[in-house]
Amino acid sequence: MAIVRKEEVVDSWSVLIGDGQGRAGEIFNNTDSFIRETKAPDVKMEKKAMAPGIIRGIFGTKRDFLIVTQKGNPRLKPFQMFIGARDYGNNLDVSWYLTQRPGFWIRVLAFFLMIPVVNILFIPFAFLSGLTSMVRERRGGLDLDLFDEQDLRAYVTNAHHCLLEAVEKLMVDLHQDPSKMERKSRGFLGIS
């Protein structure tokens, strides 16, 4: 079981397909197939059960996601795309979330800051980390150069378009009009 936290989400998209219950497998399979057909370089996909936190995961709150990652550019390692499809009553809720996970040393620092008394030793590092975060926010929230951002946009846009294609296919099978679907993501990339 893996964990995905809301505060790590930097972009997202969703649609609710009427009368689509029981068809999540089609969305996952078609999206995976369409991404493979594009021959996008260095893209890895795996289906995994995810939880919003450790405690909820232990008590059985999990959902399936197709996780799409770009392995070719090491600067994109913190970014993962989680594609989900689940029944919601008679409908099918389809969504994706692009996350940016903090690096290993930031997580270690956060851990030590939670320990009383020990945290006093790590306050200077936290202060420096906070300054670094402020500089990143002024530059748009990401620590990526132009080529890295271009690679990120390409990989996320490709996966988004493949998911849209899978959703459109299902909607046509259900005799629904896919042209009325919102296609733009809600986040810093604003993919459409």
Image (cartoon, rainbow, N blue to C red):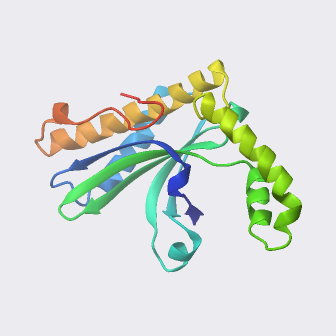
Q: Residue at x 55, y 76 (%)?
A: 55
Left-right relation of 150 to 129: left
Q: Residue at x 44, y 37 (%)?
A: 187
Residue 188 drawn at (x, y percent): 48, 33
Q: Residue furthest top?
A: 146
Left-right relation of 64 to 118: left
Give the vertical position of 53 relative to 101 (above or below).
below
Looking at the picture, tell me which residue is in the foreground, 164 or 56. 56
For residue 85, what is the image quadrant?
bottom left
Left-right relation of 56 to 110: left
Residue 158 drawn at (x, y percent): 45, 29
Residue 110 drawn at (x, y percent): 74, 59
Looking at the picture, tell me which residue is in the foreground, 37 or 50. 50
Q: Residue at x 68, y 40 (%)?
A: 133
Indicate the quadrant containing the N terminus: top left, top right, bottom left or bottom right: bottom right
Residue 185 drawn at (x, y percent): 38, 36
Query: Is any part of residue 47 visible from this angle?
Result: no
Give the vertical position of 126 relative to 80 (above or below).
below
Q: Residue at x 56, y 50 (%)?
A: 8
Query: Is any part of residue 43 visible from this angle?
Result: yes
Q: Residue furthest left?
A: 175
Indicate the quadrant containing the C terminus: top left, top right, bottom left or bottom right: top left
Query: How many numbered discs sit on the rendered protein?
Result: 0
